[in-house]
Amino acid sequence: MKKIFLLFDKIFILSPIFIVFYSIFNFSDSKYLVSRVSVLVIIYCFFRYKDSFRHNINKKNISFIALSSLILFIYFSIMHLWRGDNFGFPRTLITCVLYLAVVPWDKFSKKWIFNTIIVASYLCGFNAIYEHFFLGINRVGIATNPIPYALYCAFLSLSSLYLVSVYHNKFNKFLILLGSFLSLGALVLTETRGVWLAYSICLLYVLVLFLEKISKQKLLLFIIPLVIALFFTFNTEIESRINKTATEIDKILEGDHQTSIGARIDLWWCGTSVWLSSPVLGVGDSHLKSVIALIPNKKAYNQLHIHNQYLDTLARYGFVGLVLLVVWVISGNVGTNNRDSRRLIIIFSGLILISGLSDVPFHHTHTVYLFFLLVGSLKLIDE
């Protein structure tokens, strides 16, 4: 009976992480559960595990990310109070900080997080199959938006692929690899080109890591069937997106920007000009929104952001905001001694930094929850 209670205790403590990995990207209107459940867990852990807070904040490997998170929270909060900028990001940030600070991480091993990733890769894949083939949705990810959903799929696929090398049982390896393939299929069905590019680049990093443990010949025997299977399974979707991209480029060369890529180019020019008008602190959400509405391109004027994380942050929060945000993203890699944890964090950081060239991952707080809870939990769990 005691073991059952301890198991349910652990499940309850990690429930915010489970909701983020299993629910908010796959089921509509479930994000509100994260903050509400997090508050319950924070109160529970604060009174039941009183020493955890002191133990967690004294860990040296989190000092940099804790400091960068605090500074970023203060800066964005000041912008909210001063200009009325959106408070979603700093609110999500402080929720994660408080949760991570009070959880008794010494009760958990990293396998809890690893297994969460693996299970999520299956849920992600099955959800995409349901949306595309049963609901008839061309671009999956209706619970959030195809872009953050694509980033979620990309991380699950690459991290599961890496975890194949962490687990030793052959049957477990097969199950993990299948999860990686399912979430990769989900990524393809999002038809999000920016994340496709980020995935391809980060995949090279994962394959290089595989070379540490297996020969080039075995790696090729693994890659070639996977690529062939992927091509024949999703040939229609991939070919359609490639043809659409080529058509859009031809139109842009002819001076027609009434395309997805053309709209992004106009938005990038807009973001650059807005930033140059206030390079240090930016102009804030309201002013940027009003400037975007003036863009003649009908595919651009109603957009909520610049479709480039760097330019969008520069325009809203200036050079100071961009530096703080980038430092926060890469701070997860500082002081992470566990090899597997460090590599998973590098994979996710790389996906965000690369996909941010054509998308705005942190416009959606789903991504903030996913990134920070993953990084924080991996850094705080001792082996």
Image (cartoon, rainbow, N blue to C red):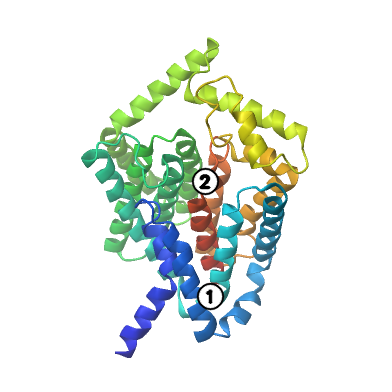
Q: Residue at x 74, y 47 (%)?
A: 320
Q: Quadrant of residue 108?
A: bottom left
Q: Which residue lies furthest to the left in this view?
A: 134
Q: Name the residue under label 1.
A: 382
Amino acid type, mark 2: Leu
Percent across and percent down for residue 252 are 53, 15
Tell me if mark 1 has few (under 14), some (14-19) or many (20+) residues whose alpha carbon lies within 10 angstroms of its own. few
Front in this rendered view, residue 32 or 98: 32
Task: Say whether disc 1 or disc 2 marks the residue closer to the N-terminus.
Answer: 2
Can the viewer see residue 104 in this picture?
no
Please name the residue shown 45% across and 50% down the image.
155
Q: Does 242 sit above or below residue 77?
A: above
Residue designated by label 2: 351
Left or right: 17, with 54 as reference point: left
Tell which of 106 and 316 is nearer to you: 316
Q: Is disc 1 placed on a helix, strand or loop?
A: loop
Q: Which of 181 and 297 is in front in this view?
A: 297
Image quadrant in which the N terminus is located: bottom left
The amino acid type, in three-letter code, at marker 1 is Asp
**Does residue 171 appear in the picture of this structure?**
yes
